[in-house]
Image (spheres, rainbow, N blue to C red):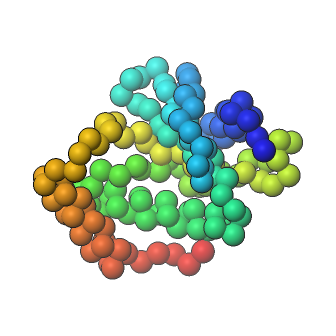
């Protein structure tokens, strides 16, 4: 099992393949993925780096890319605020990292950071906004044509 420092090394290696000039990585946590906030010298430009560590059958490169293609289309086709993926220098959505820290290739993705706050309570207005958000997503999903991966 990799440590937080090992995952930071993977994140730094991945960042070399992106057009991002970064200053600091802030560890956010680990669940199905390990996440870091990527800070730059511009407080208005932050990123989320996700190191995909879930089981390989669930987190195939094709599955991850399909999700990111859908996010790109949500950004393009709707007014929803969703984490827009960042393509690497080769134009790919998923970056594969080979390292001596793991026998498997590690898949990494990067997204534009969305500022927010922790939700306290579930008021009527929040419920309405959530319902509207899901409706837009469902309509978009029905119209979206995904590439076969």
Left-right relation of 99 to 111: right
Rendered image quadrant of residue 141: bottom left
Rendered image quadrant of residue 49: top right
Q: Is residue 32 above or below residue 136?
A: above
Is residue 23 in view?
Answer: yes
Left-right relation of 54 to 80: right
> Residue at the spot x=23%, y=45% of the render?
121
User: Which one is in front, 19 or 71?
Assistant: 71
Q: Is residue 24 above or below residue 28?
A: above
User: Which one is in front, 54 or 112?
Assistant: 54
> Residue at the spot x=64%, y=63% of the render?
59
Give coordinates of residue 29: x percent, y percent: 56, 39
Q: Quadrant of the C terminus?
A: bottom right
Left-right relation of 140 to 28: left
Q: Which residue extends farthest front?
A: 121
Left-right relation of 120 to 108: left
Give coordinates of residue 119: x percent, y percent: 29, 42
Give coordinates of residue 63: x percent, y percent: 58, 68
Q: Is residue 64 above or below residue 149?
A: above
Q: Which residue extends farthest left?
A: 125
Is residue 61 in view?
Answer: no
**Total count of labels:** 0
Give coordinates of residue 100: x percent, y percent: 86, 42
Rendered image quadrant of residue 131: bottom left
User: Which one is in front, 133 or 23?
Assistant: 133
Q: Quadrant of the N terminus?
A: top right
> Residue at the spot x=16%, y=50% of the render?
123
């Amino acid at each position: 099992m990799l440590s937080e420092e090992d995952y930071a090394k993977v994140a730094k290696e991945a960042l070399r393949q992106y057009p991002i000039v970064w200053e600091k990585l802030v560890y956010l946590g680990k669940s199905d993925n390990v996440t870091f906030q990527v800070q730059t010298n511009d407080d208005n430009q932050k990123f989320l780096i996700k190191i995909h560590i879930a089981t390989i059958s669930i987190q195939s490169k094709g599955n991850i890319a399909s999700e990111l293609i859908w996010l790109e289309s949500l950004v393009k086709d709707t007014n929803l605020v969703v984490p827009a993926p960042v393509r690497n220098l080769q134009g790919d959505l998923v970056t594969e990292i080979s390292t001596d820290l793991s026998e498997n290739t590690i898949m990494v993705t990067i997204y534009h950071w969305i500022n927010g706050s922790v939700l306290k309570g579930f008021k009527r207005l929040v419920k309405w906004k959530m319902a509207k958000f899901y409706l837009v997503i469902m309509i978009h999903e029905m119209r979206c044509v995904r590439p076969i991966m």
